[in-house]
Amino acid sequence: MSIMTEVEEAAAAELESAVLAVLVGKSKLTELAVDDKIGKYAAIHAEDLTPEQVNLVRDRIHAKLGITMDDGTVLRDDQYELWLEDARKTTNFKRAATYRQYLVGDEGFSPTVVTAMDELTDDLLELVGNPKKPGAWARRGLVLGDVQSGKTATYLGLFNKAIDAGYRLIIVLAGHTEHLRKQTQKRVDEGVIGRRTPTKPKKGSGAKLPGEIYVGIGKHDVDLAKKVQRLTSEWADFNAASQQGFSLHLEGMDNIPFIFVVKKNKSILENLHGWLADQAKDTGKLDFPLLLLDDESDYASVNTRDEDNPTVINELIRRLLDVFQRSSYLGFSATPFANIFIDSDVENDIYPRDYIYSLEAPSNYVGAERVFSPSEEIGISPTVHLFDSEDYFPAGHKVGHQVVGLPPSLNEALRVYLVANAIRDLRGQVDKKRSMLINVSRYVAVQEQVHQLVAGELLKLKNAVALHASSYAAGHPNEEVESIRAAFEKFYSDCEYSWSEVLDQLPAAVGGIVDRVINSKVDKKLEASESKLANPDRQVVVGGDVLSRGLTLEGLTVSYFYRHTAASDTLLQMARWFGYRPGYEDLCRVWITPEAADNFAFIDRSIKELRMDLIAMRDQGLTPRDFGLAVRKHPGSMLITARSKMKSATSVSSFSISYKGRAPETTKLAPVAAKGNFKALTKLLKVLTADHGHPKLGNKGGGSSLVWRQVDRAVVAAMLTDYKAHPMDFSFGPALAEHVRYKSQYDAWDVCVRQGSGGTLTVSDVNMKLIETNLEHQPGLIAVSGSKRRLAGSQDLKALIDGAAAQSAEESYLALNPKKKTAPEVVYLDHLERPALIIYPLGLSKFGSSEDANVEPPECPLVGLKIAYPGGIIDPDDTSEDVEYMITKVKLKELLGDDGWEDTESE
């Protein structure tokens, strides 16, 4: 289909918006009923849209109606008194209704998602507390979402309902950078306040300052926009001038809600606290309700020092809350590792003692599972493995590093981005924003060098397209245009457009692309100048840690990521490529090392386990404190736990990890240990056959396996002692072997050798079929590069449990999760009779290296391990399967890398 004109696209958007708006709240929508609505509204645009274009709008509407969002999970104090149902009888939630209309009509949200979000924000409003409840009270809670999953839209919906219900003051802690604060302020202006200032305001006062315009919900209801007072803007945080300039007295403005959007910055928070404390001088505390929302609450808010000497931001947040007689603190975070280090026994700290709410992302969310495990619908992986960046941006490089050029892979990624722009234009997405991200260093000086080189390369490509695209189409060769064609053929040859169509669109598609750098240096200039936050329609952005904390790059299509960390919290925040990609998910590409991709996949599995723990704890009637203990002892939090302790104290740290109901596995293989590990396997099999005879076959439901039952713990401990894991698999070390040998409650184990489809290998009179999977050699390690990025499969444990029990567990899970096709392995752990050691003998037929075609494979098969401990009732205080680890600061920094050890960008 040809690209719509501006008038046609406006008519199509108006038709789509009108139909979706009337469908909000409708629980049963048949295809005929939806088509009937489309037909009625399409008649209004009969002169502007062809039948073909109306059908395109119809397809868009049905696609959005197919988007769903499951209910979240809440863990809360059962003694809490529910209040919202009674409040509804006397409360007009007009602002909330207007926000729903805005989401569907202006933002293009699916009516089904808006309905689900409406129910979610009801739950959250119930939890943050009744603003009209008299007396002194303080609520503390935490909401867990996914990176770039729409948390902002959720809390804006909460704000509107909170104002309707009677909250008088809302403070948003919007990250630590001015870029992020301005971005959040813009969203709050549109979704809650209804007004914004497009140009720097002159001196003036009033509800609507000179130069303000109505936006967002204000365009739907002007009266609502006049009834909120904002004391920050896109132009200014609450700085010293703001503190001195505002003469408002809150106690004298009983019916006007106030909203602040501020940075997590010492001077800003001191200014705000000083202004509020001055207001409370007469009474000691302000007697009206505060809702304080802490966005990215895992950054800077948590006290990592002793209670008598708290960190600055943590102390200032506590002081802000303490100004109010009635206060509610709500942290929002993308990681369950966020608030685990807060002491739950400190009464005035921000530990989420009252509730933890785990959000579910809508079904069209593109998260870790879809990025790092190719979806069946797309049929391709969006990840492109990086192997040539180390020479340009070496691990551990310092601020003085000189960048000599751009890696070939980065040059290729730039060309892919240009092609993707042309394809999106051909798809009728001309007015949609799109971005490319480049994140290769935490140092500002290095970022600026990279930006200069990228700017030069981008200019060269744009000039080549502008000057030579037409002549190239006529048969005249051009090296740069040919390189763009090579990118099209390699990455998008199976798209719906031919190269000639893409080439014809390229000049218009790439001419407006701009290059930018976003880092702490630029952020300081932005803050000092009080300038408007630039947001080009098409951009290539170079940056570092400023890009890694909540900042949204709209339409992110191509990402180039080369950073070095294994810390779960740090990695998660760097994943700007997660989010929503309507109409272009198949075009998205992420350049990343296999090691980093493996780390993301591991984090994703850890978070899924913890969310299942949250559900189980809710069903068992446990508390937010119990969940905090479970997170702290989860294998996925190991390096974060060590880092937190190490920064505040000693050169050596000890910490406990619980393996009850867990199934950790080796995620990387050490080439230097290949021969020794195979020797350890040979020794193990010799002992097993001598003591237990030949193995039995595992249960059929779990695939082909050889199993020995009730093996003495000392045999398993010996294998764990002899086996040398990659240093990043820190859990498989002497501490685990010692625990199995002396401390575990289990005397007997099962040992399972998984069977593959490769050649047969006889070891100690045991015939094994080798597992053949894609193995990628990298410096110092061998990574599994298959679609799931792991050795184990979700069904492996079924080989060790009774078939009927496995089937029952699977059916129960699928009944509760009808959208899932298979059950995760964690559901089978409860049915294990005893712990299991699972061994993966790996053949080398699919061994290779994209970096060095001449690399030699190991001399013997590789060996991977997994241990699986029975689950059962969750008891965070149960230490029976806790393993005590010790690590030095030097070793930890080596494992985490500079990016995982340091919290902030460096100049």
Image (cartoon, grey):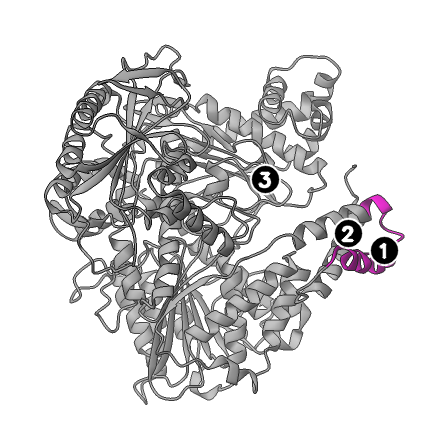
Earlier in the chain: of badge 1 and badge 2, it is 2
Q: CA distance from mark 2 to mark 3?
A: 22 Å
Q: CA distance from mark 1 to mark 2?
A: 8 Å
Asked if the stretch drawn in magenta spans residue 39, the answer is yes
Secondary structure mostly seen in magenta is helix
The quadrant holding residue 260 is: bottom left
User: What segment carries the magenta color?
Assistant: 30-53
How many neighbours does mark 1 have within 10 angstroms: few (below 14), some (14-19), or many (20 or more)? some
Q: Which residue is mark 2?
A: 12
Q: Which residue is mark 3?
A: 585
In front: 806, or 237? 806
Location of residue 880 with respect to 776 vertically, above or below: below
| Residue type pointed to by label 3 | Glu
The quadrant holding residue 508 is: top right
Q: Nearer the viewer, mark 3 or mark 1?
A: 3
| Residue type pointed to by label 2 | Ala
Q: Nearer the viewer, mark 2 or mark 3?
A: 3
Q: Which residue is mark 1?
A: 45
Question: Of all residues shown, which one is farthest toward the right?
Answer: 47
